Amino acid sequence: MKGTLGNMMQQMQKMQEQMQEAQKEMANKEVTGTAGGDIIKLVMNGQHQVKSIRIDHDMIDGDQEMLEDLLVAAFNDAMNKIAELQKDNLGGLTEGLNLPPGFKMPF
């Protein structure tokens, strides 16, 4: 029984190291959220920091409410893309562990 627990602890340590490395990689990734057929382009990094926003020049003098809605939509698009990247990059590390749905690792 001790050997099994020791092996499991080694696997958890290795997984923790892999998760930390994957999180570092995610922090350096960038996605572009768009809205309105590319009227708004918003670049966000893996730490959910907005790096830039580009607005089509013709929209600047346009409908303010529509512009605000497009900014929200572009932000949400970027957030969804980051979530998908996280799922793709980090999800494989926990496969086969039979963790309950929604379980968050402590690291």
Image (cartoon, rainbow, N blue to C red):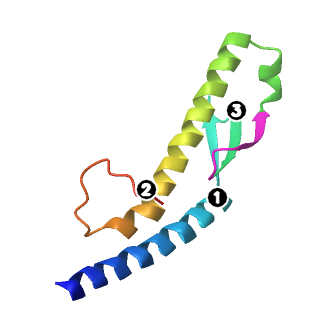
Badge 3: how crowded within 10 Å, few (<14), some, or many (20+)? many
Residue 78: x percent and y percent? 59, 42
Badge 2: how crowded within 10 Å, few (<14), some, or many (20+)? few
**Closer to the N terminus: mark 2 or mark 3?**
3
Which stretch did the figure color magenta?
A: 46-54
Q: CA distance from mark 2 to mark 1?
A: 14 Å
* Residue receiving disc 3: 40
Position of residue 60 in the picture relative to residue 34 (left or right): right
Judged by depth in the image, the label closer to the viewer, 1 or 3, is 1
Residue 5: quarter of image: bottom left
Q: Residue at x 70, y 38 (%)?
A: 41
Judged by depth in the image, the label closer to the viewer, 2 or 3, is 2
**Closer to the N terminus: mark 1 or mark 3?**
1
Above/below status of 79 relative to 68: below
Q: Amino acid at mark 1?
A: Ala
* Residue receiving disc 1: 27
Q: Amino acid at mark 3?
A: Ile
Residue 67: x percent and y percent? 70, 19
**Was residue 83 drawn as part of the magenta stretch in this picture?**
no
* Residue receiving disc 2: 87
On residue 80, the disc is none
Q: Amino acid at mark 2?
A: Lys
Q: Residue at x 56, y 71 (%)?
A: 21
